Amino acid sequence: MPSSLHEALTEMFRCRPSLVPSLLTGPLSTALPSYDRIRLESGDLTALVPTEFRADAVVLLTTKTGDPVLAVVVEVQLGRDPTKRTSWPAYLATLHARLSCPAVLLVVCADAVIARWCAQPIELGHPGWILRPLVLGPDQVPVVAGSEQAHAVPELVVLSAIAHGDEPQHREVLDAVVQAFDAMDTDHAALYSDVVLGALSGAARRYVEELMATGTYEVKSEFLRRWREQALTEGHSEGRAEGHSEGRAEGRARGEAEAILAILAARDIMVPPGVRTRILECHDLDQLDEWVRRAATAASLGDVFDDA
């Protein structure tokens, strides 16, 4: 059964087939014929023989009149599978016969070792007949960041986060991927966020979770609104529960501080780093209770802090 990562990567290309020519001509430096349109083709590549062949996705480049000029088989490969070295050439041969146009293979991998395995030439026996798969692994995925990219090509930002999110020098990719979730419908945002969080290490994952829960920009999607509402509830509850194990007063202070941050985030009020530290380091329960009360109706930081 395909994993959630396999499902998510496949869905990216089915949902946005224009990713395929962009990746081929960009990081993979592959020349393409002139084309006018892009469409998703059936992935069922079973021929007349009784063996079933089904690709993850097939993207077709056509002229304005619909004549095919190039077919691209997209395969997501997360592990070594020797049978693919037989089925991949069959995919291309079947497509070539069906559409009477050139066909190429694009393999997408989340792991660099698997990417190198997939890139090995496949010799078919006939002189000169060698298939060299075009492979997009972590080393080939570009670093994509920025609000503009997050809203224009959110799927590419997700790919970039999976490939580079654990690299400290590319933390801006994680900022962008949260904005990409905000640009998607709820179903795709839920699918891709699960995969991104699952692919990240502890520190990077916690960073993304905090951005999703308490980010300072105004969210637009129902998905992130629900996430922040849930974080508000859980943060308050967890903070109070910590009081039993860490000391009642300290636990309550932490819970109140996290509740203040969550409330401000839910009301789209930006909290500068210095103010965030001030809230989290405050242990005066009366003061924290007063800030919680003010935050519930605040329109700005000035409504919460007298000196803001």
Image (tube, grey):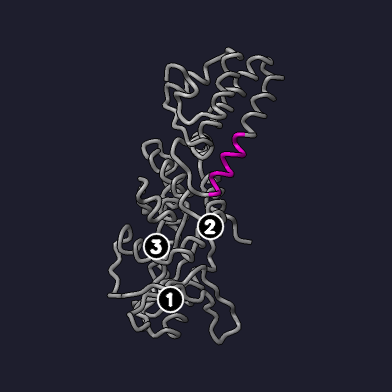
Q: Marks 1 and 2, Cα distance to the nearest angstrom?
A: 32 Å
Q: What amino acid type should be assigned to the residue bearing mark 1?
A: Leu
Q: What amino acid type should be assigned to the residue bearing mark 3?
A: Leu
In the picture of the structure, the residue carrying the numbered disc 1 is: 124
Q: Determine whether the residue tagged by mark 2 lies in a helix, strand or loop.
A: helix
- On residue 144, the disc is none
Question: Badge 1: few (under 14), some or many (20 or more) residues near its Cα, within 10 Å?
Answer: few
Which of the two labelled residues, at mark 3 and mark 2, occupies the earlier sequence position? 2
Residue 269: image x %, image y %?
A: 46, 32
Question: Can you see residue 123?
Answer: no
61 lies above or below 189: below
Residue at the (67%, 23%) spot, across then down? 242
189 lies above or below 135: above
In the picture of the structure, the residue carrying the numbered disc 3 is: 19
Q: Which portion, as a residue range, is magenta? A: 222-232
- Contact (CB < 8 A) between labels 3 and 2? no
Question: Can you see residue 263?
Answer: yes
